[in-house]
Amino acid sequence: MAVSGFEGFEKRLELRFFDDTQITNNNPMGLRLIDFESLDQVLNQVQCTVVSAVANRSFDAYVLSESSLFVYPTKIIIKTCGTTQLLKSIRPLIHLARNLNLTLRACRYSRGSFIFPNSQPFPYTSFKDEVVVVEDSLPKSLRYRKASVITPSSSSSRDWHVFTASVDVESDEPVVVVEVCMTELDRVNARSFFRRKGDDKNSDSAGKEMTRLSGIDMINANAFICDFAFDPCGYSMNGVDGERYSTIHVTPEDGFSYASFECGLSLYDDGHLDVSEVLSRAIDVFRPGSVSIATTYGGEDYNHEVSKRVERVLAKKLGLKCRSRLMDEFPGSGTVVYQSFTPRRK
């Protein structure tokens, strides 16, 4: 293990709003009307920048110098890696939404356990301190609040940290969010995310090559991929598929290699996306030595069979054994299921 290196594990913030006028059709764009200059100022406080962007009818997707930002009409998702100051975005984003007659309805902050926790600035050295900062940034109307550290029994697994706050005790968010964190990436597979010496491609062209060579383009063939290659190594992408988003971030250096995959989907839509198959394809790109999967069920009830099917598919196709499965409930924010996997040989 390296003494210090780039921190791949992201901090993730999701803010959901409702329209004060209750006439959403009068403002169908919602948060997407926030101008780029204002978003850029928020990102400057977080200590990252936009490097690439794409949009469709449903949402805007930005690849950042440290991870990703997604802007829907009534929802913002921002996740940042390294030593970024993600929580500094809460107050200005709430203010920008307020100018559009949008009021905060729910907040969720989550992250894994950092590889280099001592390199993080305050308050990210302590989850308790992070919770204090988040709570101080939120209006009192979000009165249903809970902070939890989900700790697997397996010593090789990492903790999962979640804080939620909501104005409602019941969640109305129909999207299931799946967050996958992978460490100890296969060294051969990780080579796909290093720039070749003498490569004169720009970051967009090099990113497209990494997407193709690694097999990322086959995870969801329906998605339009906005990808970006960093120099000398590293990779980020956002996938856009109707209302669904996906994102991948890779830190390939040996000793602190890390990759994340996240997607938002419905378990009961047209059925063209089987979550277990999607996860199997995403994880197979990296062949990691350790995998954790946090699945958040919002308005949809927790489906025990989905978790069991994920475990069966990952065992059969990738030889990954589920070492731990834990569940926690959050008022107004649904249920989180946290699974930890390692190869059977371990």
Image (cartoon, grey):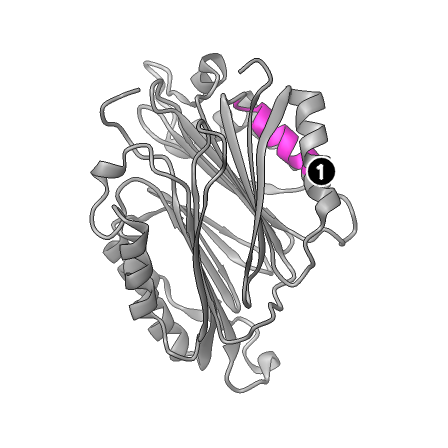
The image quadrant where one finds the N terminus is top left
Q: In this view, does 286 lie above or below 147?
A: above
- Whether residue 218 is visible, yes or no, is no
Q: Are there few (<14), some (14-19), or many (20+) residues within 10 Å of tag 1?
A: few
Q: Quadrant of residue 141?
A: bottom left
The reply to whether the magenta stretch includes residue 284 is: yes
Residue drawn at (21%, 37%) of the image: 119
The reply to whether the magenta stretch includes residue 224 is: no
Residue 151: horizontal and vertical position, in percent? 46, 41
Q: Give the range drawn in magenta.
A: 276-286
Q: Which residue, as the protein is rendered here, is positioned at the far front?
A: 153
Residue drawn at (43%, 27%) of the image: 206
Residue drawn at (68%, 35%) of the image: 310
Residue denoted by label 1: 308
208 left or right of 269? left
Q: In this view, does 175 lie above or below 241?
A: below
Q: Is residue 141 above or below residue 88?
A: below
Residue 227: horizontal and vertical position, in percent? 47, 37
Q: Which residue, as the protein is rendered here, is positioned at the far bottom?
A: 21
Q: Which residue, as the protein is rendered here, is positioned at the far right?
A: 270
- Whether residue 189 is visible, yes or no, is yes
Residue 335: horizontal and vertical position, in percent? 59, 56
Looking at the rendered structure, the secondary structure element under dot 1 is: helix
Q: How many labels does the image show?
A: 1
The foreground one among 318 and 230 is 318
The majority secondary structure of the magenta stretch comes to: helix
Inspect the image, locate mark 1, and give the three-letter code of the amino acid beneath it.
Answer: Lys
3 left or right of 228? left
Residue 245: horizontal and vertical position, in percent? 57, 49
